[in-house]
Image (cartoon, rainbow, N blue to C red):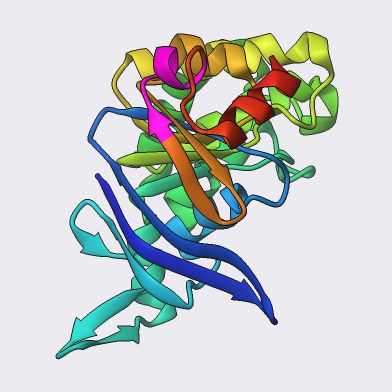
Amino acid sequence: MVRARNVHKSFADVEVLKGIDLDVMPGETVVILGPSGSGKSTFLRCINHLEAMNRGSIEVGGEQIGYELRGNHLHKLSPRAIARQRRQIGMVFQQFNLYPHLTVLQNIIEAPIGIHGESRQEAEKYALALLQRVGLTEKADAYPRQLSGGQQQRVAIARALAIKPKLMLFDEPTSALDPELVGEVLATMKDLAEQGLTMIVVTHEIGFAKEAADRVVFMDGGYVVEQGKPEDILVNPQHPRTRAFLSRVI
């Protein structure tokens, strides 16, 4: 589903990604761990071209993201073509980014109708099914300010699913939540993983990685340091840097 090769990204003279290679198979849940500043979120944003990489290649579903190959050179796609590619990629951010003036239902149907041209009837039917899936059917007519942080993040997940993506990206989705609200969001994400949705999750939630991940990737300093099954990386990491990080968070 995802094939990243030699991905480099710099901001001014600071190199944040220093040659990332990563494959994610269809239906796989990959959790990316690492300290702040390791490049986790930047890499996630490069996958759906919210950040343009400086060098390398990222394919989603066999399609080069953000660029097309002409001869031996990559050429940037038009904004319209990039927007078409993003339809197969849903993303959930740290902040919920819901429209405050729209109801929960209106937030979810905004993109399917306004960007992807679905009929209102079709979009609303699917949105209500998604709200049932995330346990918020009764909140369809509520406004974001009437919801808890955990509920808002579950609405954000439903909104990302509304475009029927092949791949879901989660960028520290629980970091802005009070501790008692984290569980309900992680439970929703675990349910998605069990249903076979392909997911890449940047998080510090070690419990989620143990329970839901097929593979754990540890990043530090712009590199993939180590990766493997959760029971290997979290219980018996081989790299000293991985061991030092886990000793502080577990």
Query: In the image, residue 188 lies at what x, y percent?
Result: 53, 15
Please say whether residue 231 is one of the residues in the magenta stretch.
yes
Q: Is residue 144 visible?
A: yes
117 in relation to 180, above or below: below
Residue occupying image coordinates x 62% and y 24%: 154
Residue occupying image coordinates x 59% and y 57%: 42
Classify the position of the C terminus by image quarter: top right
Query: In the image, residue 30 lies at what x, y percent?
Result: 41, 31
Query: In the image, residue 230 lies at what x, y percent?
Result: 43, 17
The residue stretch that appears in magenta:
227-234
Classify residue 33 by image quadrant: top right
Query: In the image, residue 217 lies at what x, y percent?
Result: 46, 35
Residue occupying image coordinates x 48% and y 78%: 54
- The reply, left or right, for residue 94 in relation to residue 70 is right
Q: Is residue 105 visible?
A: no
214 in relation to 98, above or below: above
Residue occupying image coordinates x 29% and y 21%: 196
Please say whether residue 191 is one of the residues in the magenta stretch.
no
- The reply, left or right, for residue 57 in relation to residue 97 is left
- The reply, left or right, for residue 128 in relation to residue 74 is right
